[in-house]
Amino acid sequence: MLKKKVFVICCIAAFITALPVFAKEKTYNIAVFVPGIVKGSPTYELLVEGVQEAQQRMVKAGKKVSVKTVEGGFNQGEWQNGLTALALTKKYDIIVSSNPSLPAIAEKVLQTAPHQKFLLLDGYLAGNANIKTVGFNQYEQGYLNGYYAALLSTSAMKHANSAYKIGLLAGQEYPVMNEQIKKGYLDGAKAVNKDFELDFRVLGNWYDAAKASELAASMIKNKTDVILTICGGGNAGVVAAAREQGAYVMWFDFPGYAYGQDIILGSTEISQKSACTDAVIAFIEGRLTFGTPVELGVEDGAVGFAFEGIPASVPRDIIEKEKALVEKMKTGAIKVSAR
Ligand code: RBF
């Protein structure tokens, strides 16, 4: 009898001791490394929002997820060290980041921290078992943007002039900028009129709004009436110059109409936020495949034109022509490519 009692008590004690072990569920620790600063850079804002959205959804589904966001700053020479330091803490199940220079940097980090997993948006790398890239067809985004910019430039709108010239201000030069975005933008404009030329300028950083404003003013003097701005915090300077000097601005990556009412007349967009959310959820659920890059385009619904929010001053026929282009690219009736 006593033996039986002792046995039962032991069983209960063992069960109670084991309870916390059963209850202790894994916490997924995610680090977001922003190569720059978040504010003012559309792709980075979407990156952070995308991870937060994944966290919220997973927490609702009963998972434990922690997110730490680290801003790497504008000194690009420090990014590798910053990432290595994060990886060597061995705290993060995955480091999430974004821009075309990151895959090569992550490969170097892996030489010192071979355990680390990376999810890199807006970049491309095949064959590394620790790196997943999810990128976008930036030639297509440039093409959609340039076509609309050229339609504005050849319209009867107040600040449109007779020159077949559009502008692009880039934060810096890099292969995706030179070989895809810039080329797509000019090719899209040439589809409106083959005489279109590009006034291409480089800011030299991703923050200097005063210098961006000066460069934009000089472009406008040079008969550029529509400027695509891709220079992070510098974008605000381009909007200011266009407002003062009489020109229009095109936005990239995210519907930016609110940043320049009646100055920003068109915007392309990419599904950076939802692509990021989906990939982070797939990782937590153990479904994310590494080593196999994904590249999304117009046909996937991941690159498009932001029709919602276009100012009422834009002529209807411009919007209709752009819609027709998007439709044809979606169905494959028109195929555009950098090659
Ligand atoms: N885009 C930004 O909006 N802000 C940035 O700070 C920024 N830094 C970049 C740094 C490097 C090294 C590279 C290659 C690109 C950077 N971009 C930045 C551009 C961004 O990744 C993307 O190409 C553009 O937003 C167009 O989609």
Image (spheres, rainbow, N blue to C red):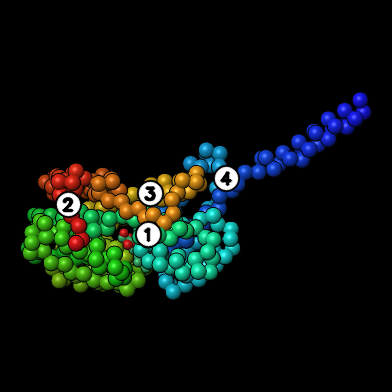
Type of residue at label 3? Ala
Q: Is mark 3 within 8 Å of ligand 1?
A: no
Give the labeled residue for mark 1. 126
Relative to the observer, which residue lies in front, 277 or 161?
277
Label 1 and label 4: CA atoms lie apart by 30 Å
For marks 3 and 4 on the same chain, the one whose residue lies earlier in the sequence: 4
Give the labeled residue for mark 3. 275
Q: Ligand 1 falls in which quarter?
A: bottom left
| Residue 209 in sight in this render | no
Report how many numbered discs are placed on residues in the image: 4
Give the labeled residue for mark 2. 335
For marks 2 and 3 on the same chain, the one whose residue lies earlier in the sequence: 3
Looking at the image, residue 82 sits to the left or right of residue 19; the answer is left
Give the labeled residue for mark 4. 64
Label 4 and label 2: CA atoms lie apart by 44 Å
Label 2 and label 1: CA atoms lie apart by 24 Å
Label 2 and label 3: CA atoms lie apart by 23 Å
Type of residue at label 4? Lys
Image location (x, y in percent) of residue 63:
55, 42
